[in-house]
Image: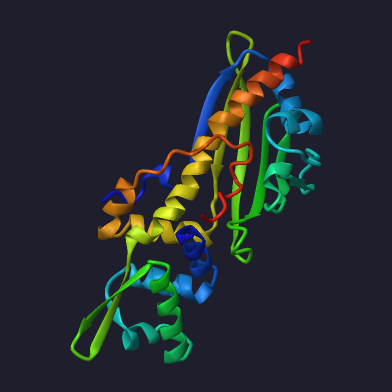
Amino acid sequence: MVESEVFRALADPTRRAVFERLSRGEMNVTELKSGFNVSQPAISQHLAALKGAGLVSERREGRHAYYRSEPKGLAPLAEWMQRYRVAWPERIEKLKHVLKDMDR
Amino acid sequence: MKHTDPNTDAIVFECDLPEPREKVWRALTERDLLAAWLMPNDIRPEVGAKFQLQPSPVAAECAPVQCEVLEAEAGRKLRWRQQEQADAVAPRLLVESVVTFELSDIPSGGTHLRVVHDGFTSRVTHCIQAMLCSQASATVLRFQPRKVRAIPVLHCLRRAA
């Protein structure tokens, strides 16, 4: 379930950009907004989606909220890449059998 | 923190096969043979040819992988770009990557096969890399994947729990 949320959250180009930007350091919404051509409510919505997927965390200081990317949230993606690493040796083992069978 | 760990965005696999290059080439480029070890397909080993890798019926929720041949040097090198849905529930997110097979002779008369799977596009990988390059990345690097069951179509994502 979490994996799907991560993919869905990152499926939007603006959210990906927000996520990447926040991985460079903590920012508040105003600082974050300055780099994007979208409204503050839109940025807030993207942040909410990223938070929901565990990709961004929020720290409150009085009236201000600061956001940063959460590396742990990427674990599902790392796992997804890992599947490819597992897949190739398995595929090559099958290829070896196919090659042997071609002799018959 | 290492910024240029080659393992973060490329998967490389190498092995020696007893068969000659021509035979290995056939197993990579003839539809029936490729289907027997990879996936049902309509491959044509010509530059620019588009083909599909069709996930098996057990993974019917997965859309076919769309491929395009980038290089095809008979008996030597086959390279294709592939595009697939990252997730059945997030079909808008397409992941692109490039698969390269290189064949070379070995003294025993067999073939050295080198498989490189890389070029994962920005949509997913840049995010990963951004994190890998950041101070906080240790968490990701320490991440231990759960045991992956041996399914024939590994590109098919496990369905959301």
Q: Along the line of sight, which residue is nearer the eye, B158 or B153?
A: B158
Q: Along the line of sight, which residue is nearer the eye, B112 or A75?
A: A75
From the viewer's perspective, is A1 left or right of B52?
left
Q: How is the image coloured?
A: rainbow
Residue B9 seen by the camera: no
Q: Residue at x 45, y 48 (%)?
A: A79
In the rendered view, would you say B40 is above or below A5? Answer: above
- The picture quadrant where one finds residue A12 is bottom right
Q: Residue at x 41, y 42 (%)?
A: B146
Residue B102 seen by the camera: yes
Residue extending farthest left:
A62
How many numbered tags mark residues here?
0
From the viewer's perspective, is B81 left or right of B146?
right
In the rendered view, would you say B73 is above or below A12? Answer: above
Rendered location of residue B53, percent (x, y): 73, 44
Q: Residue at x 34, y 47 (%)?
A: B143
Q: Residue at x 26, y 84 (%)?
A: A65
Rendered location of residue B111, percent (x, y): 62, 18
Q: Along the line of sight, which residue is nearer the eye, B52 or B106?
A: B52
Residue extending farthest front:
B161
- The picture quadrant where one finds residue B94 is bottom right
Rendered location of residue A49, percent (x, y): 45, 75
Rendered location of residue A87, percent (x, y): 55, 36
